[in-house]
Amino acid sequence: MQAIRTKSRAFSLIELVIVVVILGIIGAIAIPRMSRGAAGAADSAVMADIATLRNSIEMYRAEHNGAFPTSAATITNQLTQFTDIAGDAQATSDATHIYGPYLHAIPRQKVGLQKGLNGVSAVDGDVAAGWIYLVATGKIYANTAVGVKDQNGIDYRDY
């Protein structure tokens, strides 16, 4: 009598181990690249937010006879509401409040300890503000500690 041979259609243990090792190698390559991409996205978002804020300040300056927003305490209202030539802000437009608004809202900070905050301060290191505004120069920058750098080694305060 002849023995009937059955052919197994399952994977062997060796084949499964090889597949798991290959997936592990692919994961080891892909995960660090994805995490660098997330950090790069935050860096790009901070750059874009600073550019938006600086452009808004320049538009305000152009329409207010070369004057910057008057203080860190008033910059939010002066950029997000209607203003008159003196910089007095109100929520609605009228015959004298014809300038602006330049922004819908102050963007939230994307990095550092003040991540998520959109307040503006004149005091460096203010824990309640995401941005620092210097009235004399019109410069605005991210409120991060000195030495907090992006993935390219550039201090966020130097953007």
Image (cartoon, rainbow, N blue to C red):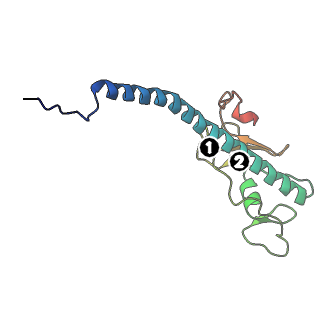
Tag on residue 110? 1
Residue 146 location, quadrant: top right
Q: Residue furthest left?
A: 1
For the question of whether residue 142 can be seen, the reply is yes
Q: 93 left or right of 16?
A: right
Q: What residue do we see at 83% from left, 46% from top?
A: 138
- The residue tagged 2 is 49
Tag on residue 90? none
Amino acid type at image mark 2: Asp
Q: 32 left or right of 79?
A: left
Amino acid type at image mark 1: Lys
Q: Residue 98 placed where, x, y %?
A: 83, 69
- Residue 154 vertical position relative to residue 111 in the rendered view, above or below: above
Q: How far apart are marks 1 and 2 (CA)?
A: 9 Å
Q: What residue do we see at 66% from left, 36% from top?
A: 144
Of the pair 30 and 141, the residue shown nearer to us: 30
